[in-house]
Image (cartoon, rainbow, N blue to C red):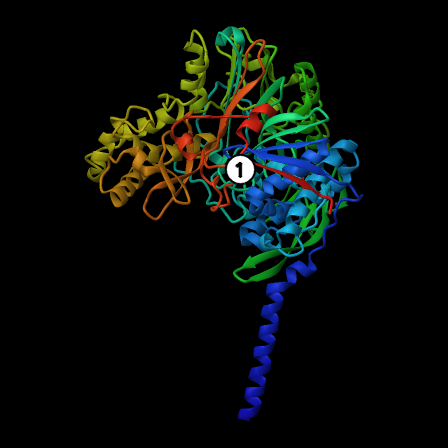
Amino acid sequence: MIRIAKWIGAIVALLLLIVAIGLMTWEPFFAARGTAPEGDHTYTAEIIRDDFGVPHIYGRTDADVAYGVAIAHSEDDFTTLQDVVAMSRGRYGAIAGEEGAAVDYAYHLLDARGTAEREWGKLPADTRALLDAYAVGLNDYARDHPGEVKLGNLFPVNGVDIAAGFALRQPFFFGLDRYMGPLVAGDPLPPEYGPSLSGDSAKPPIDDAPRIMDHSAKTPEKTALARPLPMGEDAEFAGSNAFAVAPEKSGGPTILVSNSHQPWRGGVAWYELIVQSGEGWHYAGANFPGSPFPFLGHNENLGWTNTVNTPDMIDIYKLVLDDSGKRYRLDGKWYDLEATGITLPVRFGPFTLPIRRTVYRSVHGPVIKNDQGAFALRYGGIGSIGQLDAYYRLNKAKTYDEWHEILSRGQVPSTNFIYGDRQGNIAYIYNAAIPERQEGPDWRNVLPGDDSKLIWDRTVDYDSLPQYLNPASGWLMNANNTPFYAAGAGSDLPLDSVSPVMGVELKMTNRARRAWKLMSEANQLDSDTLMRIKYDMAYEDEGYIKRMMDDVRAIDPAAYPDLAEARKLMLEWDFTADNIGRSDAIALLMIKPYMAASYQKSAWPDAVEELRRSKDHLQKYFGRLTPPMSEVLRLRQGDVDLPLDGGSDTLRASTTWDIDDDGRLSVKHGDSFIMWIEWLNGKPVASRSIQPYGAAITRPGSPHFADQSTLFVQHRLKPVHFWRDDVIASAASRETVSSKR
């Protein structure tokens, strides 16, 4: 019997070992192997890096350059590029576990692969060639550096894979995750953006107050699927600034300032590069991992930058299902709900588990089932990858008319564009694929899913979007605020210039209030004046800041004696985050939850709770309530540990942070890639830039891991070597890369 028991135990152990090995190794083998681009093309590029490691990529053709972009970016951050590729293949869960599986779920739900495959042939041949060349560059780097590849069978990839990544990520820039997460979790939905359509105020005043009237209500806890894409944790705090000044207002050059905030690491972190080809492509700016071209910056003649806008571009429909749950009703008829079984690879330690799920679609779009029913999502730009061609064309535009014509095609689904050029033109386009909706229904709430008249199939005409061209004030700005405050009194667009049905947001951020005020007050917006504005660290006593201070004043020190000192300190605050005032640190901690309530239209926080939380943090980690803010707020990258200034929602932005073990706030989102561009009459374009870390943010051994950090915390910019002679003079390294073997 003992012998039999041992034998059975050995068999069980063997079976467990087999299962364990299977769970560790199954995913790469069962994942569909990718294919390389067709054809036998040879790509050759020269990569010259300046003294900050910024790559300047040259090639005979645009495709050659795109190949070089992939190689250069891989040299600096192949780990993040692999994450993006895994997302575009629905395999990110095999790398990032549950968080990655949420991305993969979104990939299947939105049919990112199907969209890319259906739309690929509609892209012009040269755009497809660009994406294929970029894919070859990734494949070549992976082949030549097998030790860096962290997921088996991830390569090769092709242009369709690159396009699928765009199809996946774009909707989340205008807030699809804001609704997808709660729907997956079965939580209450947040209010939709745009003015109310309920009837009591068709054109409400500009206001950033929460819509929730019951201040005791609490925002639902975030779930594992609340952020289905790595847009960065705390994405609700995201923001950007943009400024454009005409020559008559600057006293000299056209000035364009790009200050687009993104997470400092990850799949949507900025990567600086300069590209130039023999086919007329010459551009300096920054892209995201997975893109063969910059998204913002400048060429010889013109430039632009972007800020996120939040019109109501998303509609949610509640479907009527039959008893089986497999059919939905539309106009009195029943239709099959499309159901597709998917397998999500989810990594848990050394194991990768196959988790089965089902994704659904109706004629409306993707469908999510929860305990409250079945809900369909429809959003602007659904089923399109036209932005891939649009950004490529914008890179090569030579005049405002040409640039504007490309943008007017409506292929870029969202984001504001702020523009400047060598001719002295400045412009602001509130760009968005806003659904063309009928008057009457309340588009700000969940819609009935059984009425086909509510399923829109086109977007509003481009000419109906808010737009500015050469305003009389001579300046333009946006800081994620309403487009109706952009150019100063007398130049701003009237509030009633667009229909409320379009859902154009009415919010004003603190950054917007400060920029609009300071630029309006300036007699001349020369470079020095504009630089002071860009690095402004003050708050206006308006909006959520006023609400916060009123709430603090209302705290009775007799009722809360433990908060008396902290309350007094807050009431002494000078409304800045400049590292000078003794109250700056505690104010910094207090502001973020109020800012979140304003941005997200959620319930105001409890001032007593927040003041106690802030007080306790400072006393626990710093032994007092008045440490210098610079001691609390830090830029940390490897061994680099530097003091930072600026706060959440100041023009000098230190927006969100991780709380480290020592209680310091390690900033991870805020001012990121900054580019200052000037065209002086009769002179070539000149620009400067800076990043928080460096060109190689995931390579600790690189000299460019954090070599820009000191300049960044000092509010200094480095030169952009746009012209080849300057590049050669500052070259730290040169290499030629080729796909020919």
Q: Residue at x 26, y 32 (%)?
A: 555
Q: Residue furthest front?
A: 729
Tag 1 secondary structure: loop
Along the line of sight, which residue is nearer the eye, 663 or 179?
663
Kind of residue sitting beneath label 1: Ala
Q: Residue at x 24, y 30 (%)?
A: 569
Which residue, given by chain and number where applicable, does mark 1 sit on?
269
Q: Is residue 138 above or below residue 682?
A: below
Number of numbered discs on residues: 1
* Residue 105 spot, x, y in % from top left: 62, 49
Q: Residue furthest bottom?
A: 1
* Residue 53 spot, x, y in % from top left: 52, 36
Q: Residues within 10 Å of mark 1 (few under 14, many from 20)?
A: many
Quadrant placement of the N terminus? bottom right
Quadrant of res 215: top left
Q: In this orientation, does residue 363 appear?
A: no
Along the line of sight, which residue is nearer the eye, 471 or 186?
471
Q: Is residue 332 above or below residue 142?
A: above
* Residue 271 spot, x, y in % from top left: 55, 35
Q: In this orientation, does residue 625 appear?
A: yes
Q: Is residue 145 above or below residue 586?
A: below
* Left or right: residue 103 compared with residue 320: left
Q: Residue at x 37, y 24 (%)?
A: 537
Along the line of sight, which residue is nearer the eye, 194 or 419?
419
* Residue 204 spot, x, y in % from top left: 50, 19
